[in-house]
Amino acid sequence: MTSSSIFDDDDGAATTCSDSGIRFEQTCGTENMRVLKAGEVTSIAFGDRGVKDAGCINKFHEQIRELIDENNCRVLILDLQGVWFLPSQSLGALMSLRKKVDRVELHNVSDELHEGLRIAQLEELLHVTYADAVK
């Protein structure tokens, strides 16, 4: 696998571009964010545990905002495979990002997360696809 550094932030965490299809990956503690595609359509995935730490939520939110601005992103796709919970701060960050793009899509949403989005009445604002089957 080939890989090269394309970004290095203040904490020394490098992001890479590799044959695996990951454009770059940023870690925060044990949590990570993988940018799969950047452009008018930007696709991002998170580690199996999701993002629960407030500091990481803020860090990833800022990086996503920068990606949106730098790439004139119109559609933001967040792959939530394996994420079963998002704290309210994450939901607020999602809505903030929604204001910057034409469309936010949440892919591979678990039943647990779907229920939280339904209760928060965010399903109508975010385009959701489910992990197990089309509902």
Image (cartoon, grey):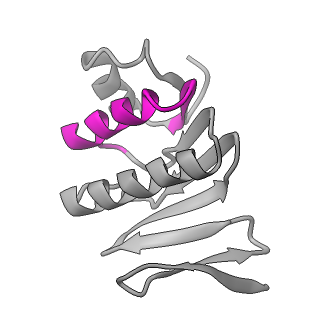
Whole-percent x and y of residue 18?
73, 76
Task: Quadrant for the C terminus, please.
Answer: top right
* Residue segment shown in magenta: 84-108
Horizontal placement of 50 versus 107: left or right?
A: left
| In-image side of 87 versus 95 (left or right) | left
Write the residue at 79% across / 74% down: 19
Seen from the viewer's position, the closer of residues 15 and 86 is 15
Q: Nearer the viewer, residue 135 or 38?
A: 38
Residue 81, can we see it? yes
Residue 10's image quarter? bottom left
Q: Quadrant of residue 89?
A: top left
Instruction: State whether residue 50 appears in this view.
Output: no
Q: Residue at x 44, y 29 (%)?
A: 98
Q: Position of residue 99 (x, y in %)?
A: 43, 27
Q: Is residue 99 left or right of residue 69?
A: left
Q: Is residue 61 above or below residue 128?
A: below
Q: Nearer the viewer, residue 81 or 124?
A: 124
Q: Quadrant of the N terminus?
A: bottom right
Tell me, yes or no, whether the highlighted magenta stretch contains residue 75.
Answer: no
Count up the numbered dots: 0
Is 101 contained in the magenta span? yes
Asked if 82 appears above or below 93 in the picture, the reply is below
Q: Report which quarter residue 79 is drawn in.
A: top right
Q: Position of residue 134 (x, y in %)?
A: 61, 21
